[in-house]
Image: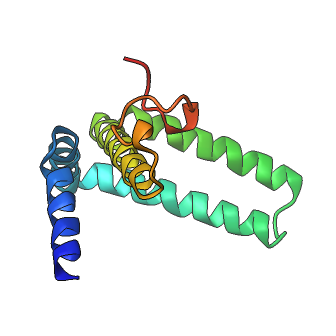
Amino acid sequence: MNTVFDKARDLATALLESEAGKKVNDARYIFDGDEEAQKQLFEYSNFRTTLETGIQNGSLSEEEIDAQVKILDQMGAELNKNQIVADMVRAEDQFNKFVGQVMNVFNATLSGDSENSSGGCTGSCSTCGGCH
Protein backbone atom coordinates (compact mmCIF):
# COMPACT_ATOMS: atom_id res chain seq x y z
CA MET A 1 0.00 0.00 0.00
CA ASN A 2 2.86 2.38 0.76
CA THR A 3 4.05 1.97 -2.81
CA VAL A 4 0.78 3.45 -4.08
CA PHE A 5 1.12 6.47 -1.79
CA ASP A 6 4.77 6.87 -2.78
CA LYS A 7 3.77 6.90 -6.44
CA ALA A 8 1.03 9.44 -5.71
CA ARG A 9 3.63 11.69 -4.05
CA ASP A 10 5.94 11.18 -7.02
CA LEU A 11 3.15 12.19 -9.39
CA ALA A 12 2.37 15.30 -7.33
CA THR A 13 6.06 16.20 -7.32
CA ALA A 14 6.24 15.68 -11.09
CA LEU A 15 3.24 17.98 -11.54
CA LEU A 16 4.88 20.67 -9.42
CA GLU A 17 8.17 20.28 -11.31
CA SER A 18 6.46 20.49 -14.72
CA GLU A 19 6.61 23.66 -16.80
CA ALA A 20 3.07 24.57 -15.71
CA GLY A 21 3.95 23.84 -12.08
CA LYS A 22 7.05 26.00 -12.21
CA LYS A 23 5.11 28.85 -13.83
CA VAL A 24 2.41 28.81 -11.17
CA ASN A 25 5.00 28.61 -8.41
CA ASP A 26 6.92 31.56 -9.87
CA ALA A 27 3.72 33.60 -10.31
CA ARG A 28 2.64 32.90 -6.73
CA TYR A 29 6.08 33.87 -5.43
CA ILE A 30 5.89 37.21 -7.26
CA PHE A 31 2.32 37.73 -6.02
CA ASP A 32 3.33 36.93 -2.44
CA GLY A 33 5.96 39.67 -2.65
CA ASP A 34 3.53 42.35 -3.83
CA GLU A 35 1.41 43.80 -1.04
CA GLU A 36 -0.71 45.90 -3.40
CA ALA A 37 -1.67 42.88 -5.51
CA GLN A 38 -2.50 40.91 -2.37
CA LYS A 39 -4.61 43.76 -0.99
CA GLN A 40 -6.47 44.18 -4.27
CA LEU A 41 -7.28 40.47 -4.54
CA PHE A 42 -8.25 40.29 -0.86
CA GLU A 43 -10.65 43.23 -1.19
CA TYR A 44 -12.19 41.78 -4.36
CA SER A 45 -12.66 38.35 -2.76
CA ASN A 46 -14.20 39.82 0.39
CA PHE A 47 -16.58 42.03 -1.58
CA ARG A 48 -17.62 39.08 -3.76
CA THR A 49 -18.18 36.85 -0.73
CA THR A 50 -20.26 39.54 0.99
CA LEU A 51 -22.34 40.00 -2.15
CA GLU A 52 -22.88 36.25 -2.55
CA THR A 53 -23.91 35.96 1.09
CA GLY A 54 -26.35 38.85 0.71
CA ILE A 55 -27.87 37.24 -2.36
CA GLN A 56 -28.15 33.82 -0.71
CA ASN A 57 -29.78 35.06 2.49
CA GLY A 58 -32.05 37.51 0.67
CA SER A 59 -30.87 40.57 2.57
CA LEU A 60 -30.23 42.59 -0.59
CA SER A 61 -32.84 44.17 -2.83
CA GLU A 62 -32.58 43.82 -6.61
CA GLU A 63 -31.34 47.40 -6.81
CA GLU A 64 -28.65 46.74 -4.21
CA ILE A 65 -27.59 43.59 -6.03
CA ASP A 66 -27.38 45.44 -9.35
CA ALA A 67 -25.34 48.24 -7.79
CA GLN A 68 -22.98 45.84 -6.03
CA VAL A 69 -22.55 43.71 -9.16
CA LYS A 70 -21.46 46.85 -11.02
CA ILE A 71 -18.96 47.63 -8.28
CA LEU A 72 -17.72 44.04 -8.36
CA ASP A 73 -17.31 44.25 -12.14
CA GLN A 74 -15.29 47.45 -11.75
CA MET A 75 -13.14 45.85 -9.07
CA GLY A 76 -12.61 42.84 -11.35
CA ALA A 77 -11.60 45.07 -14.24
CA GLU A 78 -9.08 46.85 -12.01
CA LEU A 79 -7.82 43.52 -10.74
CA ASN A 80 -7.29 42.30 -14.30
CA LYS A 81 -5.20 45.40 -15.01
CA ASN A 82 -2.75 44.32 -12.31
CA GLN A 83 -0.20 42.32 -14.31
CA ILE A 84 0.98 40.36 -11.26
CA VAL A 85 -2.54 39.18 -10.49
CA ALA A 86 -3.30 38.50 -14.17
CA ASP A 87 -0.12 36.44 -14.54
CA MET A 88 -0.91 34.42 -11.43
CA VAL A 89 -4.50 33.76 -12.50
CA ARG A 90 -3.35 32.71 -15.97
CA ALA A 91 -0.64 30.43 -14.54
CA GLU A 92 -3.08 28.85 -12.08
CA ASP A 93 -5.61 28.29 -14.86
CA GLN A 94 -3.00 26.58 -17.06
CA PHE A 95 -1.78 24.46 -14.14
CA ASN A 96 -5.34 23.43 -13.23
CA LYS A 97 -6.02 22.45 -16.85
CA PHE A 98 -2.82 20.40 -16.87
CA VAL A 99 -3.77 18.66 -13.62
CA GLY A 100 -7.23 18.03 -15.12
CA GLN A 101 -5.65 16.38 -18.15
CA VAL A 102 -3.56 14.17 -15.86
CA MET A 103 -6.70 13.27 -13.90
CA ASN A 104 -8.44 12.35 -17.16
CA VAL A 105 -5.60 9.95 -17.94
CA PHE A 106 -5.78 8.58 -14.39
CA ASN A 107 -9.56 8.07 -14.53
CA ALA A 108 -9.46 6.59 -18.03
CA THR A 109 -6.79 4.14 -16.94
CA LEU A 110 -8.80 3.14 -13.86
CA SER A 111 -11.87 2.52 -15.98
CA GLY A 112 -9.89 0.46 -18.49
CA ASP A 113 -10.33 2.99 -21.29
CA SER A 114 -6.91 2.63 -22.88
CA GLU A 115 -7.88 4.85 -25.84
CA ASN A 116 -8.19 7.92 -23.63
CA SER A 117 -5.41 7.03 -21.21
CA SER A 118 -2.74 8.71 -23.33
CA GLY A 119 -3.84 12.24 -22.43
CA GLY A 120 -4.83 13.09 -25.96
CA CYS A 121 -8.09 14.47 -27.27
CA THR A 122 -11.09 12.78 -25.70
CA GLY A 123 -13.55 14.33 -28.13
CA SER A 124 -15.19 16.18 -25.25
CA CYS A 125 -14.70 19.94 -25.08
CA SER A 126 -15.15 19.83 -21.30
CA THR A 127 -11.85 17.97 -20.91
CA CYS A 128 -9.98 20.08 -23.41
CA GLY A 129 -7.21 22.54 -22.66
CA GLY A 130 -7.60 23.97 -26.15
CA CYS A 131 -6.79 22.89 -29.69
CA HIS A 132 -3.15 22.81 -30.64
Residue found at x 34% / y 47%:
102
Q: Quadrant of the C terminus?
A: top left
Q: For this rendering, which residue is in front, 118 or 11?
A: 118
Q: Horizontal and vertical percent for residue 83?
A: 29, 34
Q: Quadrant of residue 20?
A: top left
Q: Quadrant of residue 49?
A: bottom right
Q: For this rendering, which residue is in front, 100 or 80?
A: 100
Q: Is residue 10 above or below residue 122?
A: below
Q: Quadrant of the N terminus?
A: bottom left
Residue found at x 68% / y 41%:
70
Q: Is residue 121 above or below residue 40?
A: above
Q: Describe residue 108's horizontal placement relative to residue 71 as left or right.
A: left
Q: Describe residue 99's horizontal placement relative to residue 35 as left or right.
A: right
Q: For this rendering, which residue is in front, 116 or 64?
A: 116
Residue found at x 44% / y 54%:
107
Q: Describe residue 96's horizontal placement relative to residue 22 as left or right.
A: right
Q: Horizontal and vertical percent for residue 92?
A: 33, 46
Give the residue at the far bottom of this rendering.
1
Q: Horizontal and vertical percent for residue 62?
A: 87, 53
Residue found at x 33% / y 37%:
118
Give the residue at the far top of this rendering.
132
Q: For this rendering, which residue is in front, 131 or 77?
A: 131
